[in-house]
Amino acid sequence: MITERTILVCAAVAAELDGLIARLKSPLRQRIGGRTMITGRIGNLPVSLLITGPAMVNTAQALTAVLETNPPPACVIQTGCAGAFRQSGLDIGDIAVASCVIDAELGIEAPENDPRLTQPLPFPVLIRNANEIRQEYPVTQTLAQSALSILRRHYADSAIRVQSGSIISVSTITAGEKRAKRLYAQFAACMEAMEGAAAAHVALYYHVPFIEIRAASNRVGTRDRDNWNPELAFQRCCDAVALFISDLEITDNV
């Protein structure tokens, strides 16, 4: 449940939002902080779609520019394609709703005999609501649980899997099985992407509710682009976000 305030949806590239842009009523394009944002309505709710550019620095800059120059949105939804960890049971085209977002590369390099890639920082990078954030960012659980319920109900009779789990953010895309196994052993994540931790950090800093919804375009590990399907992932993530938005109830409180 959200207020009448705008729902802000972020993605790295325009193709990850095309399916939502097509659904907007009376779309209006504008430039904020050097980025493109398209506003309109999906159903009865106002929606803004922000093309941030890829990876964490672009995401942080774009989202900060919007939050500094506009009224606070009802929530921020990070979306787009991602790599699915084989061990999670997810495959190409499946959907994940983040239970938390993890900056997989933030920390201290682990010793050579440590199976982990990193150890936690000895200091927080952000403190909010008495929570010290060192590597793992919370999502707004009420919205995440609502999204999970809505999507599982919608896809119950299909072959599309919808799963809740941590989504890690990386600056170095995994390209080998050894690193993929180490990442999964450390984080037990369902997907790997590049922007969520930055969006979660900025949203938490500005006290804005946040969730991440992704669709898998590939499997994490050895890069085999012949078996990628980004177009399917773009379609599925837009479908998932649109279903979530369309099913939300409007209330005076988040």
Image (tube, helix red, strand yellow):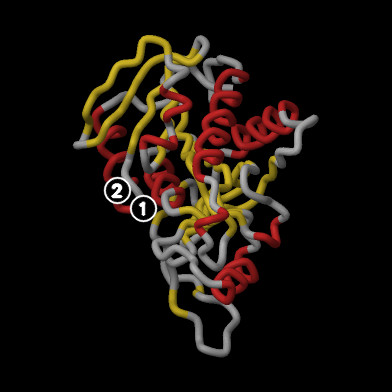
Q: How far across and down, in percent of the image, does residue 194 sit?
A: 43, 54
Please tell me which residue is depicted at 66% across the width and 50% down the height of the picture: 91
In what element is the residue under mark 2?
helix
Please tell me which residue is depicted at 58% across the width and 18% down the height of the picture: 246
Disc sitting over residue 55 in the figure:
1
Query: 186 or 250, which lies in front?
Result: 186
Q: Is residue 6 left or right of residue 229?
A: left
Residue 17 versus residue 233 in the image, above or below = above
- The answer to whether marks 2 and 1 mark residues whose Cβ atoms lie closer than 8 Å is yes
Marks 2 and 1, Cα distance to the nearest angstrom?
6 Å
Give the quadrant of residue 124: bottom left
Disc sitting over residue 74 in the figure:
none
Q: Amino acid at mark 1?
A: Ala
Residue 153 versus residue 112 in the image, above or below = above
Q: Is residue 122 left or right of residue 34?
A: right
Please tell me which residue is depicted at 41% across the width and 23% down the height of the picture: 21
The outermost residue toward the right is 157
Q: Neighbour class for label 1 at 10 Å: few (<14), some, many (≥20)?
A: many
Q: Is residue 98 left or right of residue 106?
A: right
Please tell me which residue is depicted at 33% across the width and 23% down the height of the picture: 38
Residue 75 versus residue 195 in the image, above or below = above
Q: How far across and down, in percent of the image, does residue 59 sit?
A: 34, 46
Q: Quadrant of the C terminus?
A: top right
Q: Is residue 86 left or right of residue 198?
A: right
Q: Neighbour class for label 2 at 10 Å: few (<14), some, many (≥20)?
A: some
Q: Amino acid at mark 2?
A: Asn
Query: 43 or 92, which lies in front?
Result: 92
Q: How far across and down, in percent of the image, does residue 67 sit?
A: 31, 33
Q: Quadrant of the N terminus?
A: top right
Report the residue marked by disc 2. Answer: 58
The outermost residue toward the front is 226
Q: How far across and down, in percent of the image, does residue 24 sit?
A: 43, 16
